Image (cartoon, rainbow, N blue to C red):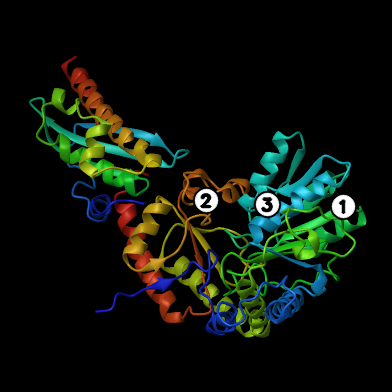
Amino acid sequence: MYNEKVLKIFENPKNAGLLKGANGVGKVGNMQCGDVMKVYVLVEHDKIKDAKFKTFGCVSAIASSDVACEMIKGKHLDDALKVTNKDVMEALGGLPPQKVHCSVLAQEAIEAAITDYKKSTEKKKK
Amino acid sequence: MIKKSVYLDNAATTYVAGEVLQAMLPYFTTEFGNASSVHSFGRSAEKALATAREQIAKTINARPEEIYFTSGATESNNWILRSAIQNHPSKRIIISATEHPSILDTCDMLAKQGYKIDYVKVDRDGVINVADLISKLARPAAIVSIMTANNEVGTIQYLNTIANLCHERGVLFHTDATQAISRVFIDVNEMKIDALSMSAHKIYGPKGIGALYIKSGVKVNKFIRGGHQERNLRAGTVNVPGVVGFGVAAAIAMRDSTINNSRIKSLRDYMINQIETRIPDVHLNGHRHQRLANNVNFSFRGVEGESLLTLLDFAGIAASTGSACTSATLGRSHVLTAMGVMDELINGSIRFSLGRATTKADIDYVVGELEKSVKKLRSISAI
């Protein structure tokens, strides 16, 4: 069902686990649909210094989480927000049609993490 | 180094036993006749069908003339439901929500045509709620169809009780015994079963061949048109090598059932015990004792089934999430849903189905890999 690339990333994800000092976290998905994705970001001067994930889900959900984290690392927040599910799909070399929603979930997780960071910094300013 | 490989998906399909294949081979080459032909080639094939029909009938104590060959249990299930509803004034069918998709899909289609489908409740272990069945039987129904043993969680139903209740009320009773043949005692006469579906490839026979048992006297409609085969009810040249293989597979399965079942059952209990001892936070799906000798089905909290299955596959282990028929789709297990299992446990269920070739060393290897894989996935899980 999956291509070699997806399986390889799933087997050895680079960005799995907790992120120390994370200042933004986005949680998307739910147990009904079978996938829950959490993306943690460490933002410094509007740049994503590091990103990690924790995901309950299928092979493509885990692989999507990993490439999403990889893609936003080092990016300015505005650029990170431009990462789409298509980019995630491309980085994975494609996903089976019934699994495309996993890449959408990854895009949403990035957005949620950045939104969370912005909210918490705004609070601090206040 | 030879990569280790352990096949624990025998409920999806089994290999073809050597004796079975040997018995089949001549019917591809020298004994290739069409069983409907009048010449010696045809007669040889016809004779082979008769022998096989007898071997298959014996597995459930039916008479050979009550056995109709089909392409498998899926076809048998389609046939009996469509036929029963057409032959009865009642527009109602009673099934359980944990039936195989071939029953559920057929019922969905019949529901769209205006028939009424009633689902009998099951308890947390997947056992039919008899009180609910009794209340549903208060009104007329064309047929009740309840599987003998569940393909996903292995729960064995109290078939005797269910069949009796139907019989007392004059309602046709059908059971899908695909997983149960040679693993659960079935006597269609003693148990008053009117119709029963089975497949060869779950008992070390070939794929693409199965049977429908229909009790003498029960009216059944023609299912496939265009020939007089199978007493004019199911047209099409009979798959003679398949039927021969099915017959031999059935005979061997019955001959060795006691020894196979007791050996496999003790491996099953060993595996359940090992998993529960070595891996925290696991949930055994299905009835602990009233279950198929070869079925182990667990949910691992915080772990999603497909991911776990894939890690096991990397280690050469073949298992399954849900049933083979549903795991290719995104659908959640309808069986676990009907049993009221929590969402996060439904998404993390894995079925291991043991077989004749399974050894204790296999189980030790699988449990070891399972422990590692569950740990790995839990360490990166969001819940």
- The answer to whether tags 3 and 1 share a subunit is yes
As helix, strand or loop, the secondary structure at mark 1 comes to: loop
Q: Are marks 3 and 1 in contact (CB under 8 Å)?
A: no
Q: Residues within 10 Å of mark 2 (few under 14, many from 20)?
A: some
Work out whether residue A53 or residue A126 is closer to the camera in this orientation and state it: A53
The residues bearing labels 2 and 1 have C-alpha atoms spaced at a distance of: 30 Å
As helix, strand or loop, the secondary structure at mark 2 comes to: loop
Q: Residue furthest front?
A: B39
Q: Is residue B253 left or right of residue A47?
A: right
Q: Is residue A27 left or right of residue B320?
A: left
Amino acid tagged 1: Val
Disc 3 target residue: B123
Tell me where residue B159 appears, x and y as whole percent. Answer: 77, 63
Q: What residue appears at the point 65 percent right and 47 percent down from the top-left corner? A: B104
Q: Quadrant of the N terminus of chain B?
A: bottom left
- In the rendered view, tell whether residue B133 sits above or below residue B160: above
- Tag 1 or tag 3, which sits nearer the N-term? 3
Mark identifier at residue B122: none
Q: Residues within 10 Å of mark 3 (few under 14, many from 20)?
A: few
Disc 2 target residue: B326
Q: Quadrant of the C terminus of chain B?
A: top left
Disc 1 target residue: B171
Tell me where residue B350 appears, x and y as whole percent. Answer: 47, 58
- Whether residue A21 appears in this view of the structure is no
Work out whether residue A38 or residue B160 is closer to the camera in this orientation and state it: B160
Q: What residue appears at the point 33 percent right and 75 percent down from the top-left corner? A: B4
Q: Chain of mark 2?
A: B
Q: Nearer the viewer, mark 2 or mark 3?
A: 2
Tell me where residue A124 appears, x and y as whole percent. Answer: 18, 20
Q: What residue appears at the point 24 percent right and 29 percent down from the top-left corner? A: A84
Amino acid tagged 3: Asp
The residues bearing labels 2 and 3 have C-alpha atoms spaced at a distance of: 22 Å
